[in-house]
Amino acid sequence: MMEEPYYEQVGVAVTCRGYTEYERMFALDEAALRRGEVLDVASGASSFAAEARSRGVRVISVDPRYAMTAEELGEESRAEIETSAGKLAGLMHLYDWSYYGSMERHKAMRLESLRTFLRDYAEPGARRRYVAASLPSLPFEDGRFALVLCSHFLFLYGEQFDEAFHQAALVELLRVCEPGGEVRVYPVVTLRFRPYAALAQLIAHLEALGASCSLDPAGLPFLPNSDRMLVVRKRAKVGP
């Protein structure tokens, strides 16, 4: 039997996505972004944080690659963009191009996001807002962030990271989220474009901790079956 086509990936790819892509992936609006501080987890070389801050939104980004220099990260990211373009060329018929329009525009947007990111990342004091760390252990105090975002890492790499890792990672994202705040994770499919198999068990665990969970519409259906995001709402504090 012929194997279904999928996106082949060794290791975790560095991503370069911009503000408008985040708006669509996470169904973001001004009210959600201005409730308090925002955490972008596994953000790679994406320009969302830099663009959001230019709009007055407070964003902290976290990724293990932030131990790298701007030159090192820029070199890796440009290479990844080229590699990704080559892979997408063989899978074009599987993807929804309604937002990007073409392979050329998709690549151009990646490169523009990277340029914006690198300008911000190279600024003096940037390491206060670009923190080198990785799940499932983040160096932030409990309940710091009103909104926690994680794109193209959890669930997507479900064949590389097991269910125990995903459970620990989601609990950690919930820990740093403030009471009454939200964790949003996109997409909920793997690199084989299938729903993450243990999602129901993970949701049950989070709800046992007092959170409420839902699979809400997402507005960037580029990957096959990627029209949903996981939203985890942390229970608000009761009383003083």
Image: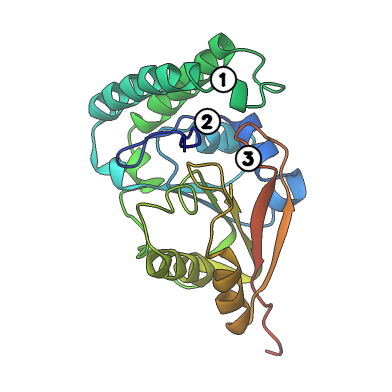
Residue drawn at (53%, 60%) of the image:
197
* Corner quadrant of residue 10: top left
Q: Name the amino acid, label 1.
A: Met
Return the x and y of residue 101 as percentages of the image width and height.
Answer: 67, 15
Query: Distance between the Cα atoms at labels 1 and 3?
Result: 37 Å
The residue furthest front is 1
Residue on which disc 3 sits: 56
Q: Name the amino acid, label 2.
A: Arg
- In this view, the mark in front (2 or 1): 1
Residue on which disc 2 sits: 17
Residue on which disc 1 sits: 92
Earlier sequence position, callout 1 versus callout 3: 3
Query: Distance between the Cα atoms at labels 2 and 1?
Result: 19 Å
Q: Name the amino acid, label 3.
A: Gly
Q: Secondary structure at mark 2?
A: loop
Residue 43 left/right relative to 66: right
Residue 116 left/right relative to 131: right
Q: Counting other residues with Cα less than 10 Å from the Cα at mark 2, is it few (<14), some (14-19), or many (20 or more)?
A: many
Seen in the picture, residue 127 relative to 98 is either above or below; the reply is below
The residue furthest top is 104
* Foreground residue among 116 and 199: 199
* Corner quadrant of residue 109: top right
Residue 199 left/right relative to 229: left
Query: Distance between the Cα atoms at labels 2 and 3?
Result: 19 Å
